Image (cartoon, rainbow, N blue to C red):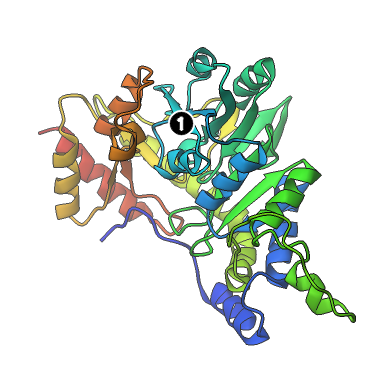
Amino acid sequence: MIPIAKPFLDTTEADAARAAVLSGWLSQGPQVSAFEREFALLTGARHACAVSNCTTALHLALLANGVGPGDEVITSSHSFIATANSIRYCGATPIFVDVDPATYNINPERVAEAVTERTRAILAVHQMGMPCDLKSLMAVANRHGIALIEDAACAIGSQINVDGDWELVGKPRGSIACFSFHPRKVITTGEGGMLTTSDAEIDRNLRLWRQHGMNVPDTVRHRSPQVIFENYVFVGFNYRMTDVQAAVGRKQLERLPELFARRRAIASRYGELLGNLEGLILPFEPEWARSNWQSYCVRLPDRVDQKTVMQNLLDQGIATRRGIMCSHRETPYSNDARRHDLRQSELAQDHSILLPIYAQMTEEDQVRVADALRVELSR
């Protein structure tokens, strides 16, 4: 079986987890603090705050920017449903706009058209690891005085060229960037998330919110030679990362350059193997972007049935996934009154498939995938 994805883990991560378990400190503690420092250093962010997953990161990012009941947040329907759900958690309304058909990322022109007096933030997704057009989105946000938040769940390691220099996604161009460490991502802690920001006050609030609003962290109380009584300054959440996860994450972070290079090589080879298949549209990478290729998405010819192709490949032991879902087609969002044209989002979901991609993938695996897809498109 060729899976759609496979995390890269070995005894290095197992030994790190074992050491964390045997240390006796399992919940948010010294390993989390170290992981945060190393993540901030890697991305060039001033602050990094670890949480339980990217959905909680998105929730906190919206709260930190004042999003609440009655507000609107412009975002992409063409994303995992957690993006829209995080907006609803705040009592706000997601305003879905269409994507650029070349990159499948949110279209800045459609964002500009959707801004109203109720718009509080733009929640932009770096879909499948491909950086979105932050320069244009920042221009819209600055023009209207609203926040730009990056859903960078898939984009750890991806790069953007800023004034001639390559920067990692995570050195926030807007207010906050949010990451996921789910096993489908380039690096993983099993579950887990991270928020990066340049704003010290935002970082302080994130750390309070993730731990029930507690004003004195456990690490401070345990180090203190004096008895300290903590206070709870507002209603918070239990959004903490464990030290076991963070210990694994630190080792994964060390692997990131190698994993990034390997995935880019695999994506390049896919381009060579699939470039001559009639009607197949390969993913597009803008000249100012370097994707981590968290996913490799191809657009099938309109004459081909997506589900049939996927089933035939699965019968041959090749796993695929449909194009990224559209949240506006799901029950919680299907009756929203305000609906912008989402044609490109729907076409992307209905006519695209994600091919297997992971660091351990061999040349033989890729040839097998390409040959099987070639047969399907020739039927």
User: According to the image, label 1 marks what residue?
Assistant: 94
Q: Is residue 308 visible?
A: yes
- Image height of 203 relative to 105, above or below: below
What amino acid is found at the position of numbered circle 1 in the picture? Pro
Which residue is depicted at the point 45% across and 61% down?
7
Which residue is depicted at the point 63% across and 79% down?
20
* Residue 305 left/right relative to 42: left
- Image height of 320 relative to 77, above or below: below
Q: Secondary structure at mark 1?
A: strand
| Relative image position of residue 203 (x, y in whole percent) | 74, 48
| Relative image position of residue 101 (x, y in whole percent) | 39, 22
* Residue 58 left/right relative to 95: right
Of 234 and 259, which appears nearest the observer?
234
- Image height of 284 relative to 117, above or below: below
Of 218 and 307, which appears nearest the observer?
218
Quadrant for residue 58, please give it: top right
